[in-house]
Image (cartoon, rainbow, N blue to C red):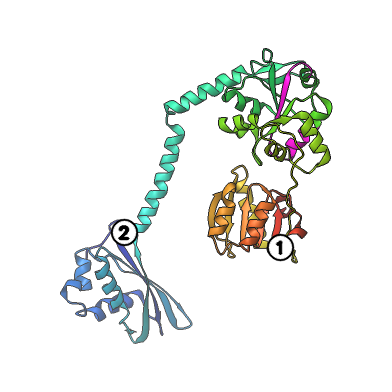
Amino acid sequence: MGKISPVAAKYIVHASIEIEGVVDRPDVIGAIFGQTEGLLGADLELRELQKSGRIGRIEVNTETRTGKTKGNIVIPSSLDKAETAIVASALEIIQRIGPCNAKIDVSNIEDVRISKRSMVVERAKELLKRMMENTMPDSQELADEVAASVRVMEIVEYGKDRLPAGPAIDESDEVVVVEGRADVLNLLKHGFKNAIAINGTSVPETIIEMCGRKVVTAFVDGDRGGNLIIKELTSVADIDFVTKAPDGKEVEELTKKEIHKAIRSRISGEQAKLELSREPERTAMELVRRHPQQQFQRPMQRPPYHPAPSIRRVQISNEEKATFKSMLEELIGTRGAEILDNKLSVLGKVPISEIHTALKSISNAHAVVFDGSIERDTVRAAEESNVKFLIGMDSKVRQNETRVNLVTVNELG
């Protein structure tokens, strides 16, 4: 009798069988051949199909309990899909096996090629990953690697505090004071060779001394830490100008265009010190935006923020808590956001800057998990879209100011 290899099969018929009595496997196979004989015509006769290898070996697995037999039937087929479906449906006409009543139900016809295709795709991914790890880098990658190594070699240690600095720090009349070594490297990459890093939150004596004889611009990250460094610098040193990276960004990740824009938008150190002392909660970037050309007139009053009525905070379920925590950990460092529905399925993945636009186009958003601080603009967008949860690294909005439930990484444990 011909057989069909599982490798050659295109489809596999899966059926369940229930028999009101005790029968053996040969009884089931005999019933399948006997009761379908002549039913489908000569071209679809099971015995002939099996002899020619178009139907494979019929596998029957049975188990007898309390006088009844249950099991499953597996039939591999290399027929086309219509012929395979006809053969499968013919199994369901069998109502008796031996002396016992029986019922056969075809549960599924599996397309073997789909399983093979999935296996091919997964294997291709593995091979591509291995190839990318072991393949020689292209010309651009080599050039970038060489350029990066040269930039590292150009960095010098300046002063008694041995601070990381660009090679032109001594000869330049103007210098840019940044927070760390990575900031100096990024400025050096974009042609600024007169940067020097504080390397900490306390201002080194080298920086204080330099501020007395050079024109100094403090260039800090666009976060609360940047504000603290500005306060420290302006309190102990003679800082000429102050500027910041865009909100939520660090100097080390800015493009050349963003660096030039920030330098052009700098404000005087005295103005920054005055404004920060009057309004400690206002960010230095707001000062820069308010005085883009160093016209230091009295600032216009910002319109008051009218928060939405607060509601009782919804308790987070254990499933939500675990999902939010896992997603937030995966998003760290990506500056990205994931929007979920009420079943915690992902509706979309977007950069933080596009959260507002995405929420306008999604009607059933339940939660937004993102790598950043929860700010008023994001809260407003969430309120307008009836979002229930905002999950971020930290929050600049108090819970009682909004009906949206604000969750930070510390609350997720």
| Residue at the top extreme of this rendering | 171
Tell me if I can see residue 331 in this picture: yes
Q: Which residues are magenta?
A: 212-231
The residue identified by callout 1 is 403
Q: Name the residue: 30% across, 56% down.
A: 7
Residue in the image at 80% along x and 29% along y: 234
Image side of residue 369 versus residue 4, left or right: right
Mark 1 element type: loop
Inspect the image, locate mark 1, and give the three-letter code of the amino acid beneath it.
Answer: Arg
Instruction: Name the residue beneath numbered marker 2.
Output: 6
Q: Position of residue 224 (x, y in %)?
A: 74, 40
Residue flagged by tag 2: what amino acid is it? Pro
Identify which residue, 243 or 382, lies in the foreground: 243
The image quarter containing residue 23 is bottom left
**Position of 256 compared to 164: left or right?**
left
Label 2 crowd bin: few (<14), some (14–19), many (20+), radius 10 Å: some
Residue 371: image location, x then y, percent: 63, 47
Give percent across and percent down for residue 26.
Answer: 32, 75
